[in-house]
Image (spheres, rainbow, N blue to C red):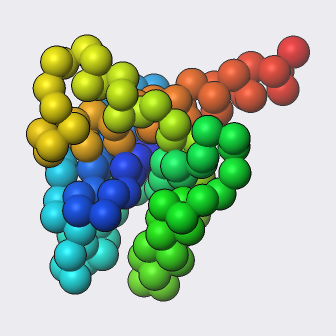
Amino acid sequence: MRIMGLDIGDKRVGVAVSDKLEITSLPLEVYKNDNKINQKIKSLVDKYDIKKIVVGLPYTLKGEIGTQAKKVISFVNNLKKGLSIGVDYIDERYTTKIPLRLSGKSAGDKKIDKFSAGIILSDYLIKRKRQIEDIKK
């Protein structure tokens, strides 16, 4: 089973998936955020045998839930209606700036969204691994 990472924006949704051992993150796809997006995500959940979805939540710089974060939460609540898997949130501040800086591309380049999803998922996998290691100590 795998974990899926989502970077949800007003125009596009970036998608990444983990490997089967849930160690690495693979940027996968960018979809237009339209009325077909939920079905596209659900198809990927089935195709990749996804057991959990991790969504980047765009907190404000003060660490609060702002307008954009509320939009993401609403999107996820709608998506969860047709899924029987868990959804976790992770702070996504700066996840778009990192691939922009590394690639030299602009924020309008849709490839950036899948790399942002990859960073969101990678951060989650690292955090989870650290928590497991702490429990073992």
Relative side of 75 to 66, left or right: left
The image shows residue 130 at horizontal and vertical percentages of 69, 22
Is 93 located above or below residue 102 in the figure? below
The image shows residue 22 at horizontal and vertical percentages of 46, 34
Closest to the observer: 98 or 135?
Answer: 98
The answer to whether residue 118 shows anywhere in this view is: no
- The number of callouts visible is 0
Is 20 located above or below residue 1 in the figure? above
Q: Residue at x 37, y 50 (%)?
A: 7
The image shows residue 121 at horizontal and vertical percentages of 44, 38
The answer to whether residue 107 shows anywhere in this view is: yes
Query: Image quadrant for the C terminus?
Result: top right
The image shows residue 122 at horizontal and vertical percentages of 45, 30
Q: Residue at x 48, y 69 (%)?
A: 71
Q: Residue at x 52, y 37 (%)?
A: 93
Closest to the observer: 36 or 131?
Answer: 36
Q: Residue at x 59, y 48 (%)?
A: 59
Q: Quadrant of residue 39?
A: bottom left
